Amino acid sequence: MSAPIARIERLGCRFGALAAVDGVDLDIAAGEFLALLGASGSGKSTLLRAIAGFEPPAEGRIEIDGRDMAGVPPHRRPVNMMFQSYALFPHLDVASNIGFGLRQEGVAAAEIARRVDEAMAMVAIGHLAGRKPDRLSGGERQRVALMRALIKRPMLLLLDEPLSALDRKLRAATRRELAAIQRQVGIAFVMVTHDAEEAIGLADRLAVMDRGKLLQIGPPRQVYDRPANRRVAQVTGEVNIVEGSDATWLDLGAGAWAIRPERIMLGERAAGLPRGGMAEVVELRSTGALWQVTLASERGARLSAALLSSQIPPTPGTRLAFGFAADAAVPVPP
Amino acid sequence: MSERGARAWILTPVWLWLGTLVALPFGIVAKLSISEQALARPPYRPLLAWEEGGAVWQGTLGNYLMLATDPLYLRALASSVALAAGSTAIALLVGLGLAQAAIRAPLRWRALALAAIVLPFWTPSLIRIYAWIGILKPEGYLNAALRALGAIEQPLAIHGSWAAVTIGLVYTYLPFAVLPIYAALERQDPALAEAAADLGCPPWRAFWIVTVPAAWPGLAVGGLLMFCPAVGEFVVPELLGGPGTPMMGRVVWLEFFNNRDWPLASAAAMALVAILAAPFLIHQRLGARR
Amino acid sequence: MKRGFAPVHGVALALGLVFLYAPIVLLAVYSFNESRLATLWGGWSLRWYRGLPENRALIEAAWTSLRIGIAAATLATAVGTLTGIALDRLGRFAGRWALGGLVALPLVLPEAILGLALLLTFIALGIERGQGTVILAHAVLAVGYVALVVQARLALIDPRLEEAARDLGCPPLKTLAVGPVPLLWPAIMAGWLLALVLSLDDLVLASFASGPGSTTLPMRIFSQARLGVTPEINAIATLLIGVVAATVLLASVLIKGTAGRR
């Protein structure tokens, strides 16, 4: 990792007695795409707002580009934010919204016009320059908000749930576009999201937060495959948590274990795998792309497995063999 | 009962009420405004007279001509508009300050602040205007206080001046300005002001170039709601104003009660309505453009 | 979401409240002044209040105002509630636009114009002027406010409630009675109170519409206030403000209580 562009040390934010952010240490590298993943109330948005300067930290420090940000108001910080609601100014048209930040800096009008045109061309919204926000579609608004925040070329772009206001189909396309833009401009992005798939699909590094604490940070696949604890395993995707007598049933040691459903193999595919056994298929459901199979041991322990739709699903009510690789079960302390 | 029947039960009384007590009166004023005054009971000539050979049109635009040419009426018209517009502008500014302050207050104080702002307006406006006489008159509390502080030697002649009328209008109609502004500001996404700050705009500037313009619909409604009654106000100029502050509401009153010139009073009323139509049309125009 | 309450907001709020309350407080304090001179403090006294019960004209005007207010508020609430329902629940009908305009007209017209127009109408229709005409005039003004309050509240009530009632076999008019109207009670009560306050507050409409025997309290106060500030008016004004403020506070507590129970 190259030299960090922002350093966050032992940061804490409080709302009354509640510690919204609690002792967070985090370095952000130049040009990286960092995703902050967590359930609502995990403190991820508060952390983002603290970096932008909207939440005063109760303790710790934030340093951006080598400068301590304590006491620096939001309008003097070298970071920009894309708001969850987009917060487009309703009385200004698209071009004026995008150029707003440059006007605050006193950039010459001709220069503003040039850079606004460039920004609009980048996301193909040049034809919308004269429109007011209330006459834009959701996807168009999202692009205006992104470009308005990017045009000042901040050290750090903060994105608060940037895709949550879009419908599912648009979200996939916008996700690709966002990744492409990030690579093109080379600015470090910090994105807050509650959608694990989105975070893993976009980020270079994934940070998982829960109850104000930063639980784990690392490359997305690593966090997904080797969650440090139970909460990380749950927040990053579907997971079976196996513990106590169920763990003995599966020949795992004491403690709790996390097994992703897609790592559990069924029928002949289970042959030769070091862990597993026999179980009854109690439920079979299709999500379209996947089969979700619920297995039950004789003693009632449940496991869910996932297999691709192209495979032949097992019949509910039958007993069959299942198995998984030794590294599919990860010990997860509570 | 059928759907139609239910509608009729609701709509018939409503139409009957609005027809006889709103539409008809308006028509009668319009009709009277083009009638001629007469020494009779009622004190005007009918529009159509039956003489030999049929009906004779007796309508006249003389009342309007009188309003448009007599400097006395023109001055009243101009000063009504100026006083109403000026006090509306001041009330909008005061309203913005109060509404913004109330909204920024901690949540449990917010409702209380708003209630405190609105409560005085439930009390009789006549009394609240009357209370200002005691403050503004030459031997009133304000002059007494200023004199005690040594700020002035001669009492200020505020009572009877345009300043007194402006204060009275602002005081009387402030809630009409505050409530729509408050509603507009409260509906506003708080992220708007944050976005402005995030893009490098200091708070004071952000308030003027983002918060206020984004609340424009509320400001427009508040301004209209205040300007319209204020322009025809009677009690404020009567109690706080003087010869220098003629207003059309008083003209209508005086022409009717003192001069018994019903047609001229009606024409003055119609002229006022015409003045009021202008801001409405502008508002609708602006609304359509959005 | 946290929004900063800066010192500037506190100062603005404080200044605003001083502007709003100082006149009322001064008026109230000086109504207890022993001295007849308005600005000279002569010690605390109740002498101006003691004189009030003997002022027969004032007492009579107060009763007249109250009678007119209650009648006008009740009439306006009935018509205004129907109007609010018509505007929010009847969908599109011929003349809806005109109806909306006519309802709003008395709200934005200066009172002097409305008063003149109503008086000319009463004369044209040969209606004898008296308490009845003042009641009508006040109701005309208040209908708009009641309709506004009712309409705003109706807009918050899910129309599917009525659809559910219809679906379960309820006829149209009864649907309104069992569906939204019970939920509307707080709005109807608020509208009635607003109408009462408007009536008690009004001087201009009453002056135009009144005849013999219908001199209202504001008319009586106004004819005296024109002549200048006197401790007697201060006393009656303070009394009135106290009564109105107490009524409004009580009503808002009651309405909040009703709303809270639902």
Image (cartoon, helix red, strand yellow):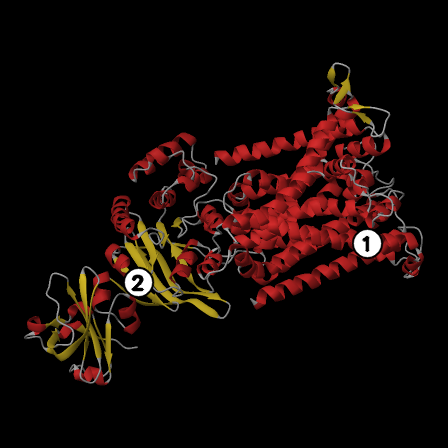
List the single residue furthest toward the top.
B53
- Relative to B258, residue C253 above or below: below
- Relative to A311, residue A183 above or below: above
Between the residue at mark 1 and the residue at mark 2, the CA separation in whole angstroms equals 63 Å
Question: Please, what secondary structure does the residue beneath circle 1 have?
Answer: helix
Q: Residue beneath label 2, please?
A: A207
Question: Please, what secondary structure does the residue beneath circle 2 have?
Answer: strand
Q: Residue beneath label 1, please?
A: C26
Q: Badge 1 sits on which subunit?
A: C
Q: Position of residue C212 (x, y in %)?
A: 87, 44
> In the displayed structure, does residue C212 sit left or right of residue B56?
right
Residue B232 visible to the viewer: yes
x 11%, y 72%: residue? A266
Residue B225 visible to the viewer: no
Q: Depth check: A324 or A189 in front?
A: A324
x 26%, y 56%: residue? A203
Q: Depth check: C253 or A20 in front?
A: C253
Q: Badge 2 sits on which subunit?
A: A
Instruction: Locate residue C137: give its quadrant.
Output: top right
Q: Residues within 10 Å of mark 1 (few under 14, many from 20)?
A: some
Instruction: Locate residue B253: give its quadrant.
Output: top right
Q: Position of residue B279 (x, y in %)?
A: 61, 33
x 26%, y 70%: residue? A233
Depth-wise, is mark 1 or mark 2 nearer the camera?
A: 1
Identify the amino acid type marked 1: Leu
